[in-house]
Amino acid sequence: MKRVVSGVKPTGDLTLGNYLGAMKRWGEMSADPELECFLFVPNLHALTVRPDPEELRRNSRAAVAWLLAAGADHEHTYLFMQSQVPAHSELTWILNNYATVGELNRMTQFKDKSQKLGAEGQLVGLYDYPVMMAADVLLYDADEVPVGEDQKQHVELTRDIATRFNNVHGETFKIPKPTVQTEGARIMDLQDPTRKMSKSDADLSGCILLEDDEKVIRKKIMRAVTDSGSQVAAAADKPAVTNLLVIMSVLSGKPIDELEQKYAGRGYGDFKEDLAELVVRTLKPLQRTYTQLMKPGNDQIDKALEHGWWRASELANAKLGQVKELLGLM
Ligand code: AQP
């Protein structure tokens, strides 16, 4: 059986980008009896933005509910909170000694995030994030790490760290493969198509949240920026319309050229209305399940977490024990 590991950070309300770039596929993978899926909520990673504790607790639970709503609810799928498996923290510290400052300096996500404030004022946790991500993956001997385009570089670093460790201490970690789906890998902000749609953005007007109600979704899509001209076509000089076409294509399963033909000569208005309808229709059943799961008294989230924690701890503790033995720590 192949093992897959991935996660979604509880740093805010999840977005359509999270869903299309990652969670939709995780839901499909969860249904595959040949796969063991470890889907966790990296709440320790969330500390890099120093969240309000109550908000962190709520967002972490909500992330589990969205994962379940997206279909990650099968026997061989293990949902868990990162902080409930202490091996993640311990292995991070160990792997810090197998990654270099030069490597971390090259991580584009860190560079992007430190652009506004400069690297000097950034927290060490944010800088070290990719090493913890390596620990997250290597503890489970993952074969595959399905991520959005933005996380691919971190998985490459995970591979380098694992290879370095194996070279020194002998075969210990499986070398995981990043799998990035081509379509929907990078959904952009509806107000600024040069920026990724991100849940922790200060201005969420260009960001569709999975919790947004029908009215808000329609408003955000109808107000999405468009490019000059009126043709619904994907092109390098039409990043806004291209982004909307990508969203429609992933949701409808139809190739972009087919959609371009369908909307030829019809202008942006019709196209946006249809897209809004499609997004609303897709999210409705997920939202319904999510609302049920989050109701006080519903214990499905806790049950799923218990099921996941048990299996995740079993594997992670065994791997950590092996590493500590090799390093003379036990
Ligand atoms: N806009 C996006 N398009 C495609 N995929 C995306 N992902 C995130 N945003 C997009 C993918 O979702 C998975 C979970 O991501 P995450 O929340 O753990 O981390 P992130 O990439 O940092 O997501 P955000 O929303 O941008 O969070 P913040 O604002 O907190 O940094 C990953 O597989 C990711 O690629």
Image (cartoon, rainbow, N blue to C red):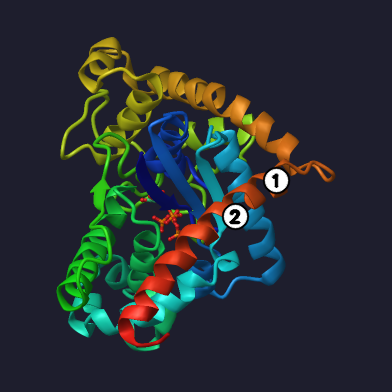
> Is 31 or 203 nearer to us in this picture?
31
Q: Nearer the viewer, residue 26 or 16?
A: 26
Asked which quadrant contains residue 281, the reply is top right
> Of 275 and 148, which appears nearest the observer?
148
The crowding category of the residue bearing disc 2, from other C-alpha atoms within 10 Å (few below 14, some 14 to 19, many at least 20), is: some
On the image, the x and y values in percent for residue 129 come to 38, 72
Q: Quadrant of residue 288?
A: top right
Q: Residue at x 37, y 65 (%)?
A: 133
Label 1 belongs to which residue?
A: 303
Rendered view: 265 above or below 180: above
Q: Residue at x 63, y 43 (%)?
A: 65
Q: Residue furthest right?
A: 297
Q: How many marks?
A: 2
> In this view of the protein, can residue 326 be seen by the observer?
yes
Q: Position of residue 142 (x, y in %)?
A: 33, 52
Residue kind at label 1, given as amino acid type: Lys
Q: Is residue 88 left or right of residue 307?
A: left
Q: Quadrant of the N terminus?
A: top left
| Mark 2 C-beta to ligand 1 under 8 Å | no
Compare marks 1 and 2 and give the one earlier in the sequence.
1
Point 37% across, 45% down: residue: 3
Q: Position of residue 156 (x, y in %)?
A: 21, 60
Residue under circle 2?
310
Element carrying mark 2: helix
Q: Position of residue 183 (x, y in %)?
A: 27, 34
Vertical comparison of 137 with 48: above or below: above
Mark 1 surroundings within 10 Å by alpha-carbon count, few (fewer than 14), some (14 through 19), many (20 or more): few
Position of residue 118 in the picture relative to residue 56 (left or right): left
Name the foreground residue: 198 vs 123.
123
